[in-house]
Amino acid sequence: MCPIPFASSARSTLGIEWELALVDKDSGDLRQVAQTILDAVSPDGSQHPNIRQELLLNTVEIVTDVCNTVESAGRDLSRSIELLQTLTDPLRVELMCAGTHPFARWTHQKVTDKQRYATLIDRTQWWGRQMLIYGIHVHVGVEDRSKVLPIANALLTYQGHVQSLSASSPFWGGSDTAYASNRALMFQQLPTAGLPFDFRDWSELEKYVDDMTKVGVIDEFNEVRWDIRPSPHYGTIETRIADGASNLTEVLALAALTQCLVEHFSTMLDQGKELPRLQPWFVQENKWRSARYGMDAILILDEHGNEDLITDDLGRLLTELEPVAARLGCEKELSDVRVILRKGASYQRQRAVARRSGGDLGAVVNHLVNELRAGKPL
């Protein structure tokens, strides 16, 4: 069995990846101009350190450097957005983000010309071609490999909370799906995506990777696309739960919540405390409830099956995490989770715009574009 080394990483350092859609300023539909933009960002053909290509030509991804605080990660993202806008504005292209585009058709999208993407589409076919989705990935540094799986399993007890807060994909191909996060349930159709397995120790993870490599499912670990996964190359736990957020305030609020949860659980381990766990069937049920009902979901909170409305439990959680946020210097960003509670998650705001405009999903796209430019929920 091939060992999986875990890189050295400073505790609770942070990295954020944010996938952005490229939309036509006039029609609101997606534009296949990612390669044009990437060529302009790096004329010599090298990869820009903070702006990257993605599966589809309607998407670019912006990433931060390794950051000590959420605030510094926000500065990195802001710089990347400003640079991109100097290139997209002359093309009459806007940056937009949500878990899904409200009305674009997956059949019209072009795949980036790169072997890894061609291999993915060749294997996954119809489901792979439908991955017209956008998300946020948050990396948090973990200083000791022995902590990684216990913390990852504990994070699953709040998977539904993060998914509901970020839910921004109620529309698909011009129709309201009646789900808060249609993206969450679509993405898990890929063979190595969705909820992670309930591994108890690192050797079980290594056995999984060894088995999947042996039978040709994956060639390397980064092809495992779980909602929560170790990222051995970076020495982090990576959460891939969140739908794409339409604005920087929400991105940073979700990042602060994730960073605080990882640090909180790491501290509990230092103190010899047992971390919370949920049965896999409860985790699976919570994922479905949060995808379907979003901020109206009643989630399963513990292994005994106690339940509560997500908004009530989030209120308790934010209070519990306030001292952690103070240590990490992200009090403001964590408190912005309450902005989402007050103004509604993105799927709620999108539906409100659709109602006011008589069902015009072009107005929803304009709303999402305006939120990205404003940097906050509107």
Image (cartoon, helix red, strand yellow):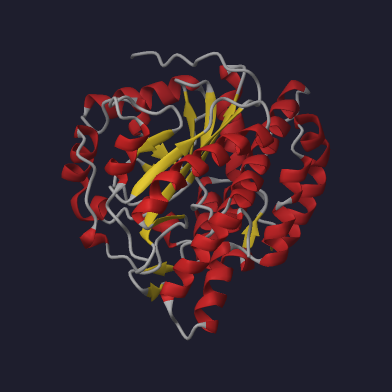
Q: In the figure, residue 372 lies in which quadrant?
A: bottom right
Q: Is residue 11 left or right of residue 39?
A: right
Residue positioned 74% across, 27% down in the render: 267
Residue positioned 22% across, 51% down in the render: 110
- Locate the C terminus by quadrant: bottom right
Above or below, 295 relative to 259: below
Q: Is residue 195 left or right of residue 324?
A: left
Q: Is residue 100 left or right of residue 294?
A: left
Residue 118 rendering spot, x and y as whole percentages: 18, 40
Residue 38 rendering spot, x and y as whole percentages: 33, 37
Q: Residue furthest bottom?
A: 358
Residue positioned 34% across, 14% down in the render: 2
Residue positioned 32% across, 65% down in the render: 104
Q: Residue furthest front?
A: 90
Above or below, 289 relative to 47: below
Residue 320 rendering spot, x and y as whole percentages: 81, 44
Residue 87 rendering spot, x and y as whole percentages: 39, 45
